[in-house]
Image: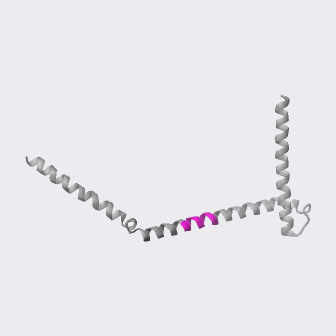
Amino acid sequence: MKSLLRWLGIFLGVLLTGVLGGIFYLAWRASRRTGKSVIGSVSDVPEEAQLLVSEAESRASEAVSASLRAARDRAAALKSRIPIIGSAEEVSTEQPQEAEQPQEAENKEGAET
């Protein structure tokens, strides 16, 4: 039981240290932006947290759009290099028709005999 309480105390201590460290970081960041002291910027922490989240979201969306753009460009480059990719539908529709004709001829010959 003592061991469990000891681990629980360690966990809560680490958690509290992380929370306080995050608050200090956000206050420091707000103080750099506003010019106030770190202690004076503690009241700006929620606003700074929202700003940090919105910056992270915009960076993530920019990264996704850039990677999608690069994938489209690469696909277009591959299509121009390999001409069969552009006409894959034509090839796939022509081959089954040619394959069916000999089979139909064989079926007709088998039916006649």
- Residue 94 in percent (x, y) is at 28, 62
Please say which color scheme the image uses: one colour
> Is residue 21 left or right of 107 when viewed as pictured?
right
Of all residues, the one furthest to the left in this rendering is 113
- Residue occupying the point 32% across, 63% down: 91
- Look at the image and give the residue range highlighted in magenta: 62-70
Secondary structure predominantly adopted by residues drawn in magenta: helix
- Residue occupying the point 18% across, 53% down: 104
Q: Quadrant of residue 9?
A: top right
Relative height, residue 83 to residue 10 (above, below): below
Q: Quadrant of residue 47?
A: bottom right
Q: Nearer the viewer, residue 105 or 20?
A: 105
What count of labels does the image hold? 0
Of all residues, the one furthest to the top in this rendering is 1
> Is residue 38 left or right of 49 when viewed as pictured?
right
- Residue 75 in percent (x, y) is at 48, 66
- Residue 3 in percent (x, y) is at 83, 31
- Residue 38 in percent (x, y) is at 90, 62
Q: Quadrant of residue 70?
A: bottom right
**65 magenta-colored:** yes
- Residue occupying the point 76% across, 63% down: 51
- Residue occupying the point 25% across, 58% down: 97
> Is residue 112 left or right of 52 when viewed as pictured?
left
**12 magenta-colored:** no
Q: Quadrant of the N terminus?
A: top right
